[in-house]
Image (cartoon, rainbow, N blue to C red):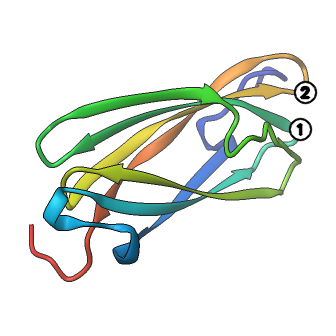
Amino acid sequence: MIENERKPDDIDISVQTQYLQDQSDPENNRYVFAYTVGIENRGAKPVKLLSRHWIITDDNDRVEEVRGTGVVGQQPMIGPGQVFHYTSGAVLTTGFGTMQGSYEMLSEDGEKFAAPIPAFLLSRPLTVH
């Protein structure tokens, strides 16, 4: 393997979601969700998270793209074997939706690469879709 070549499994991203009923207002089409992301560096060298790109799709197939520097005001350096966690939120006009995207990462040797964020569901609990 070439030294600066990235394997797709070097960065493992996991997401847990939660419907925030106390902040939601279904009568006015406002559904609030929190999501906690874990970004694990399974590679041999540190990486820095530079930016994020989210694609948020609600149950009406309305798509919103969000791009920005870092996450929750940080551009964390994640060492080999380390996991960085953060929690953020999304507001939808429907009780269901999906999110997916990618993080732009920077390796120790200056290589930029995309770490894909697998699609995950935002959903009110105990509802049938």
Q: Residue at x 73, y 22 (%)?
A: 5
Identity, as a three-letter code, of the amino acid under mark 2:
Glu
Q: How many numbered marks appear?
A: 2
The residue indicated by pointer 1 is: 45
In the rendered image, the vertical position of residue 27 relative to residue 21, given as above or below: above
The residue indicated by pointer 2 is: 108
**Measured from the top left, where is residue 74 in percent x and y?**
78, 41
Residue furthest out toward the bottom? 126
Q: Secondary structure at mark 1?
A: loop
- Quarter-of-image position of residue 88: bottom right
Identity, as a three-letter code, of the amino acid under mark 1:
Lys
In the rendered image, the vertical position of residue 39 relative to residue 8, given as above or below: below
Name the image quarter holding the C terminus.
bottom left
Q: Residue at x 9, y 74 (%)?
A: 128
Q: Residue at x 43, y 46 (%)?
A: 118
Gap in angstroms between the C-alphas marked 1 and 2: 6 Å
Name the image quarter holding the N terminus.
top right
Callouts 1 and 2 close, C-beta under 8 Å: yes
